Image (cartoon, grey):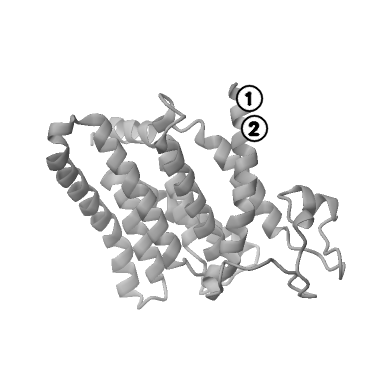
């Protein structure tokens, strides 16, 4: 049953990845997500049998059926990564007690939003507001469900107000460093999309988890930037999208928050 469920998650993931690829390509450009997909070169509409996730790309040899131009590996990569991360949701510490639950749907939504943010910012250096809002909504319902699990019905209203207030404060605290960098650099060193995303990260992970996610994002970003400069792929003043590193930091904390917080407490005492 476990193998079957993991296979189901992978198939669901690659199918969703096909849709996420559309979001990544169209939302940053202000295009409608409705309508048939078409070849970027010859503009011919792609038939349904050439839109099967992963399989169509392999069957066509990565080329358009009509004009034989190469199809970007970008779409294949999104589908594959989404499938892998949908499987990894099964191993989330938060879902070990009950994988068949609404929480699983919320986490799948959060992972999907993070994938769109990663590739949108990487490709266009834009984090669409609609995806930021979707990420917040999934996080909000996750926190609502979390509160319902912990407290009895009589306590719920007060606890909703208290817990949500704490989450909003955590979002504001985590957002402050990014907002400061945005203000100091006049938007050149950090985009406002990164500011908004840092708020959602804080809301989702809490103050400690959110700040640690930022810490990992800065470390990974700095190392990546240094490597790109050494390889002469980027210059010292080149602009590098920060959203993908925020996604990396967030995913690290989503999967390893308990272990990381334990180590931080053991080393620093807080």
In percent of width and height, residue 87 lies at 57, 36
In percent of width and height, residue 94 lies at 39, 32
Tag on residue 73?
none
Side (left or right) of 151 relative to 130: left
Tag on residue 3?
1
Q: Which quadrant holds the N terminus?
A: top right
Q: Which residue is mark 2?
A: 7
Of residue 197 and residue 48, the one placed in the foreground of this image is 48
Q: Which quadrant holds the C terminus?
A: top left
Residue at position x 61%, y 62% from top? 22
In percent of width and height, residue 115 lies at 53, 53
Of residue 28 and residue 261, the one placed in the foreground of this image is 28
Residue at position x 49%, y 47% from top? 111
In percent of width and height, residue 189 lies at 41, 71
**Residue 178, quarter of picture:** bottom left
Contact between marks 2 and 1 (CB within 8 A): the answer is yes
Tell me how far mark 2 sits from mark 1, CA to CA: 6 Å
Side (left or right) of 95 relative to 67: left
Crowding near pointer 2: few (<14 within 10 Å), some, many (20+)? some
Residue at position x 29%, y 30% from top? 266
| Mark 2 secondary-structure assignment | helix
């Amino acid at each position: 049953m476990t193998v079957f469920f993991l296979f189901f998650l992978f198939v669901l993931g690659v199918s969703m990845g096909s849709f996420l690829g559309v979001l990544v390509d169209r939302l940053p450009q202000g295009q409608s997500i409705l309508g048939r997909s078409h070849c970027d070169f010859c503009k011919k509409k792609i038939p349904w049998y050439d839109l099967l996730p992963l399989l169509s790309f392999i069957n066509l040899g990565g080329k358009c059926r009509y004009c034989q131009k190469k199809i970007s590996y970008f779409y294949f990569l999104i589908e594959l990564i989404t499938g892998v991360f949908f499987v990894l949701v099964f191993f989330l510490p938060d879902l070990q007690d009950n994988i068949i639950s609404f929480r699983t749907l919320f986490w799948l939504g959060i992972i999907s939003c993070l994938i769109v943010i990663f590739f949108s910012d990487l490709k266009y250096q834009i984090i669409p507001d609609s995806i930021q809002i979707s990420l917040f909504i999934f996080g909000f319902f996750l926190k609502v469900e979390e509160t319902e699990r912990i407290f009895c019905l009589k306590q719920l209203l007060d606890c909703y107000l208290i817990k949500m207030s704490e989450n909003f404060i955590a979002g504001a605290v985590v957002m402050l460093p990014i907002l400061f960098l945005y203000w100091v650099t006049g938007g050149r060193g950090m985009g406002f999309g990164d500011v908004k995303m840092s708020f959602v990260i804080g809301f989702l992970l809490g103050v400690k988890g959110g700040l640690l996610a930022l810490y990992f994002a800065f470390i990974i970003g700095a190392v990546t930037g240094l490597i790109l400069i050494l390889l002469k792929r980027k210059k010292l003043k080149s602009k590098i999208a920060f959203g993908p590193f925020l996604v990396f930091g967030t995913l690290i904390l989503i999967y390893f928050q308990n272990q990381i917080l334990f180590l931080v407490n053991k080393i620093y005492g807080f």
